[in-house]
Amino acid sequence: MYGEMKSSPMRPGHDGVHMAPSRRLRAHLENSKPPASSPASEYLRNKPLFRASSNLSELWTSSVVTRVNNLGDYDPIACHRRTTRQPLARLTNTNQSSYFWKVYPSSKREKYYSTMTSGEETVGKDIETESRGVVVNHLPNEMLLKIFSLLDVKDICYSTRYVCKRWNVLSNDEALWKNSEFVCTKNMTLEYIYKMLRSASLLRAVVLQWRLDTAGILEVLCKCCPDIQRIQLICCGMINLNTMEMLSVRYPGLLHLSMGKSFSVQRDCFDVLGQFRKIQSINLSHSRLTGDQLESIVDSCPDLVEINIDYVRGIEERYILNLIAAKKETLVSLAVFGDRVTDSTFEALQECNKLYSLHISQCGLLSDRGLKSLSSLKTLSSLKLRYASNISYSGLCKFLLQKTLSSLKYLSLSRSNKFDDVCAVSICQNCASLQELDLSYCPNVTAEGIKTLSQGCKSLKVIYYNVFNPEHSVFMEKIVFKVPVDKKNYAVGTSLKKKNVVDNLKEVSTSR
C-alpha cells in the first residue's frame, strides 16, 4: 500500500515531489493568483470607447459612460467579426478557480463563466447591472443614430464601430453620414488625415483649413470617399488646374464648393467650375474671378442658388445684372463686393422673390432710390450694406421703418456716416425679430442710441459698436454688447464683468 502511494501521480504545480500538508497549503496559496489581464482589457483601460470631451458623455449619466469605458476582457476589434465566442481569459486551473470563487463577487464570476453571444450582450449586461433605468441596447435604432450624430468622424470610425455588431451596422448607416463632415485643420499631420479618409468611405463633407498640401489631400479624398457632396477650402493655397479637373471628374454631382479666401489659386481653375452641373452653392470670395468666368458659371449651373463673390474686385455691373436676370426666380443668397454696383442693381433685385440674404460690402454708389427698391424684398432675413455714404438721413430712417424689414434677423450698416440715434429708434419700432446688429465705425451713433437699442429690441442679442474719440477723430475701441433676453445685464468685451446697462453706458459716454 505504501509503495502504491509513492508511485501515484503527483498533483500539478508541485514539481513531482510529495510535500507535507503545510507546504502543500503554502504552495496552493502562492499559485492562487487572480487571472492576468488580457491585452484587450489593457487596450480598453488605456483608450476608452468614449472620450471625456465627447458629446456622448453629456447625454448619458456618468455611471453608464464609466461602465462602457471599463468593460471587461473582450476583444473590441474581433467583437464584430464573430457572433459566438468565449471570454478571452477563462479560468482552467483548479487553484485559480477556487481563489476566484472566494475573492470575486458573483457579478464578476458570472462575467467570466457565462458564454456570450456577442459584444452587444456584454455591453447591455454591464450597463443594466449598473443602472436599471438606462439600457443603451434597448433604445431604438433611430435614437441611437441621433446620439451618434453628435459624435465626430473619429469617434464613429474608431469607437462606436467596434463596440458590438449592432453598433457596427449603425455606424455604417447612410443617414448617420448624411450631415457629418471631417475638418482638416492646419495642425493635423498628413498621415492622420489619410488614415481618417481611408476609414470614412461614407463621408459626405470635408473641410480644409489653412492647408498648403491641398492637392495631395484632395487626391486621397477622390480615391477613398466617392460620395462627397460638400467641399470647403478655407484659406487654403496651392490649388492648381489638375486638382480642379480631378474634382470635376470624380464628383460631378457636387452640391457645395467653397474656396473663400484661398490664395495662390490659378485663374484657370475657375474655368472648370462650370462642369459641376448640379452645384447649388459656391463661394469664391477674395479670388481673382473675372466677369466672363462668372457668366460661364451662371450659364452652366442651372441649380445654382447661392453665390458669394464678396471682395472680388473689378467685376462690371453688367455681369451682376446678367446674374440677377438668370437667377431671379431661384436666387436665395447673394454676396458681392459692389465697388461698381449702382441703383440699377438694387432695382433689378426687386424681382428676386426668394432672396433671403443680401450682402454688399461697398455701397458707395447707392442712393435713396436704390435703397427704397429693397423694401419690396419680403423674404429678406439677412442684410449687409457697408459704406453706404451716399444716402440721406431721412432715406435711411424711412427704409428702416418698412414692414418688409420686420423679419430681419441680421443687419449690418457698418461704416455708415448716416446712421444716428434717430435710426436706432426706427429699428426699435420696426425690426422686432432682429438678433444681431453691426454698427462698427458708425461715428454718429452715441451711447444713448445703444441704450435705446438694448432696451427696445426684444430679440436683439449682439451689437457691434466702436467708441469714437472726437479729439483725435479716430475709433479707439470695438465693443461687443451681448444683450440677454431679460435686458438686465450685458457684457462689454471679454474682460469686463456683467453690470447694469445704464451704468455701463455712462462709463462708455465718459470714455468718449
Image: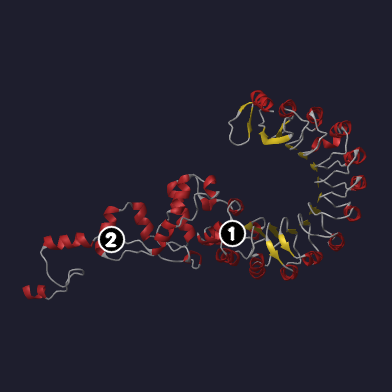
Marks 1 and 2, the one that precedes in the sequence: 2
Q: Nearer the viewer, mark 1 or mark 2?
A: 1
Against 66, residue 5 (above or below) is below
| Cα distance between the residues tagged 1 and 2 | 39 Å
Task: Tell me the amino acid under the disc marked 1.
Answer: Leu
Against 499, residue 463 (above or below) is below
Q: Residue at x 38, y 57 (%)?
A: 111
Nearer to me, 132 or 162:
162
Dot label at residue 97 = 2
Dot label at residue 499 = none
State if disc 2 and disc 1 touch (CB < 8 Å): no
The spot of residue 36 in percent (x, y) is 32, 62
Task: Tell me the amino acid under the disc marked 2.
Answer: Ser
Nearer to me, 389 or 9:
389
The quarter of the rendered structure image containing the C terminus is top right
Residue 101 image-quadrant placement: bottom left
Q: Residue at x 21, y 70 (%)?
A: 12
Q: Give SS at disc 1.
A: helix
Going by the image, does 181 lie left or right of 419?
left
Against 510, residue 353 (above or below) is below
Q: Which residue is mark 1?
A: 170
Mark 2: few/some/many CA within 10 Å (<14, 14-19, 20+): some
Mark 1: few/some/many CA within 10 Å (<14, 14-19, 20+): some
The answer to whether residue 182 is visible is yes
